[in-house]
Amino acid sequence: MLIPQTLIEINTRNLYNCLDNAKFEAKSLSEQNIILEFQIYILKIDILIQESNNQYDLKSIKLTFNKVFRKFIGLSKQIELLINSNMFSPQSWLSEALKQTKKLIIEIQESTVHFCE
């Protein structure tokens, strides 16, 4: 039996924009590269979210949701490592990116609870 299409509404735009603005404040090429890598990672997560919106199998949707959740957890750990390493002197963009990532993790947790009910 097919279930109706379920849309996962996880908006990564704020995080992406935060990183986009950080590119202009970056002091070095390596910092710009890290920011671009994070943006590419977020775009890949967006693709996963879109894939889940095209699935009709409840099990597949849940598995995709879990992948998205794990990817955001991994992203937050990477950002925390950069903050702790003091690699970049002004870390405001890292702190903002971490804040946005944690908001998305909470949003995903709440959506998962709502979705599984």
Image: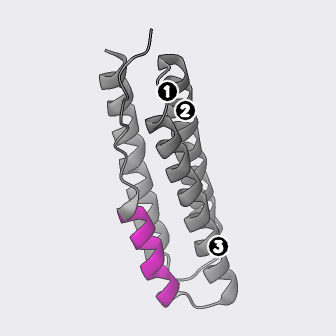
* Quadrant housing residue 111: top left
Q: What is the spatial separation of the Cα atoms under label 2 and label 3, in whole angstroms?
A: 26 Å
Task: Give the overall secondary structure of the magenta segment.
Answer: helix
Badge 1 marks a residue whose secondary structure is helix
Tell me the colour scheme of the image.
one colour
The foreground one among 9 and 17 is: 9
Q: Residue furthest front?
A: 1
Q: Residue furthest top?
A: 1
Q: Is residue 78 above or below residue 25?
A: above
Give the residues in magenta: 14-24
Marks 2 and 1 close (CB-CB < 8 Å): yes
Instruction: Name the residue located 49 percent from the left edge and 36 percent from the top edge.
Output: 52
Taking 109 as reference, is 84 left or right?
A: right
Q: Which residue is mark 3?
A: 34
Residue 103 image position (x, y, % from top left): 36, 49
Position of residue 52 relative to residue 47, above or below, is above
Asked if residue 15 is among those painted magenta in the image, a careful observer would answer yes
Place residue 112 in its image quadrant: top left
Closest to the camera, between mark 3 and mark 1, is 1
Judging by the rendered image, the residue that carries numbered circle 1 is 61
- Say which amino acid is labelled 2: Thr
Name which of mark 2 and mark 3 comes first in the sequence.
3
Q: Nearer the viewer, residue 52 or 87?
A: 52
Image quadrant holding the N terminus, namely top left
Q: Amino acid at mark 3?
A: Ile
Q: Which residue is mark 2?
A: 64
How far apart marks 3 and 1 lie (CA) works out to 30 Å
Q: Could you tell me residue 58's position as x and y percent? A: 47, 18
Q: Is residue 68 left or right of residue 117?
A: right
What's the amino acid at mark 1?
Answer: Ile
**Helix, strand or loop under label 3:** helix
Which residue is found at the position 41% from the left and 49% from the top?
102
